[in-house]
Amino acid sequence: MLSADDDALLTQTGPGTSMGTLFRRFWVPVLLSREVPEPDGAPVRVTVLGEELVAFRETSGRVGLIDRRCAHRGADLFFGRNEDCGLRCVYHGWKFDADGGCVDIPTMARDEGLRARVGLTSYPTREHGEMVWAYLGPPEHEPPLPALEFAALPPTHRFVSKKLQECNWAQSCEGALDTAHFSFLHTPLEVPDIPPAQRRHPFANATRWMRDDPALRRVPVVVYTGAEIGSADESRLRGLDSVVIVKGAHSPEQLLAATAGFLRRVTAEGCCGRDIAIAASCRRAACPLSSRASIAYRIGTKE
């Protein structure tokens, strides 16, 4: 059990924190590209590493990521007008470009000095694999974008999604790695309110042994992801008599459908106590929003 100080050290990711400094040395996903689908479209609120920001796709197609509060009176730029290569505050009309620079103050004579002094914090962005990535660290330490295999494929051969998780990034990662919960939390159960003929999930019988076999409590369930499994490991796994390797399963339902035949076979053969290894060509990544919330991105490939 972590102490309160160690817990804070691990989970606090705001500016000036140890983990926040570490995360800021890497490109982090902040949006799916489809959340800012068109130039001059509506801005999007973004919270990442404890910072409140706003994203917008400017007229040229570039995605800007800047401080959410206007430098003038602190109005929320989420309500601003995205027009002519900049985001205009609806309060007094101050306009900021994707670099955070103030490019227009309608109520004042043109003053280059003033506009230079009232810029907003901005962060560089890149689009890669249908995701918008941002770098929030020191410019002199900016690394190259991560070379992830899914991003090199055409859109027809990959999928990306995201979900909000009301837990910190470490808990999100821990949940993704925790295979012990699979046999219990994700096993379909009877629902009494549904008529008997419709009570069971189509694959409930195939996975019933997970719930009913007491020996399973002593058997580890190992889940392999396609990103971490090499050809030698795959050959070794295929040599086991209680192994199924699934590639191209893009949701829990598809994964269950792909493994249903295997589960029926081991049930018929009385193999309830054998180890199971499942390999799917997908992976998850947790991006901290704050110490209490994170975004889990699911990315992978299609065959």
Image (cartoon, rainbow, N blue to C red):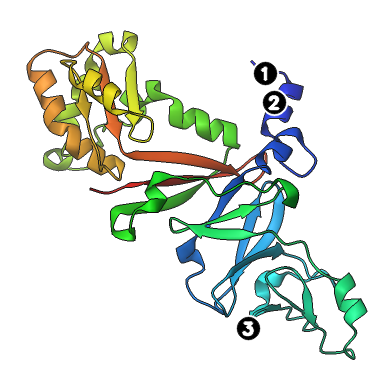
Task: Find disc 2 in the rendering and name its residue.
Answer: 7
Place residue 183 in its image quadrant.
top left
Q: Is the C-beta separation of discs 2 and 1 under 8 Å?
A: yes
Residue 255 placement (x, y as % from top left): 25, 38
| Label 1: which secondary element | loop
Residue type highlighted by circle 3: Glu
Mark number for residue 83?
Answer: 3
Task: Find disc 1 in the rendering and name its residue.
Answer: 2
Q: Is residue 5 left or right of residue 210?
A: right
Tell me which residue sits at (51%, 28%) in the image. 174
Quote the CA–CA distance across marks 1 and 3.
49 Å
Lower position in the chain sequence, tag 2 or tag 3: 2
Residue 138 shows in the view: no
Residue type highlighted by circle 2: Asp
Q: Is residue 24 above or below residue 259?
A: below
Tell me which residue sits at (67%, 78%) in the image. 86
